[in-house]
Image (spheres, grey):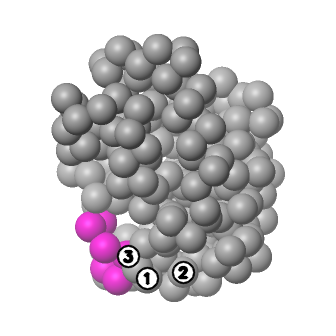
Amino acid sequence: MNILWDFDGTLFDTYPVYSKLMSQILGPEIREDEIYAQLKISFTHAFDYLDVSETQARRFFSLFRETPAQAFRPFRDVEKVLNFADENVIMTHNNRTDLFKILKLYGFEKYFADVVTSDDHFPRKPDPASYIYLNEKHAIDLVVGDRLLDIIPAKAIGAKTCLFQNKEPGADFYLDDYQDFFITVRL
């Protein structure tokens, strides 16, 4: 089985850290759980919804780059799924440097045959261009993400889809915890 993964909120529990950083910038008037909910839709959506200025956005990304990789933790049991797959690839809007800083800390880089990041200049999800590219190279069977914009492009390549910690309609499978992967996902 070849799996295409989203990174943030799918492989690693990054959104609590992002919410905390954004809260530092926006102040106590906006609750962290509200920031979290908006970020889970998309960064673009959250920045628009929260009326984040360009200066605030630059500050956010600066704080993110200053955050130690140890602040970002892999989800429990995700490594078992990575180890099970024949091939794993990542498509993320994160940049390559920050992504590999986190992957290398946990020794996860060895699990990925290919990675597409913002540095590769594909259109942002849900545009399917990056998925098509990865599918042509790796024959993707399953796409795992935490947001609809992660699984929408999977339909363009004919892959099965799995939403992680998200029950929005549209996926073939739903997981709240990776320990259930082997009983839930059947290809």
Residue 122 location, quadrant: top right
> Three-letter amino acid code at disc 3?
Tyr
Residue picked out by circle 1: 77
Which secondary structure lies at badge 3? helix
The label shown at residue 178 is 3
Residue drawn at point x = 69 percent, y = 52 percent: 98
Which residue is nearer to you in this view: 172 or 81? 81
Q: Which callout, 1 or 3, points at the residue further toward the start of the chain?
A: 1
Q: Is residue 149 above or below residue 57?
A: below
Q: Which callout, 2 or 3, points at the residue further toward the start of the chain?
A: 2
The label shown at residue 148 is none
Q: Distance from label 1 to label 2 (Cα)?
A: 5 Å
In the displayed structure image, the side of residue 47 where residue 133 appears, left or right: right
The quadrant of the rendering that contains the N terminus is bottom right
Residue 38 location, quadrant: top left
> Three-letter amino acid code at disc 1?
Asp
Q: Is residue 62 above or below residue 161?
A: above
Discs 1, 3 touching: Cβ within 8 Å? yes
Q: Position of residue 131 (x, y in %)?
A: 64, 41
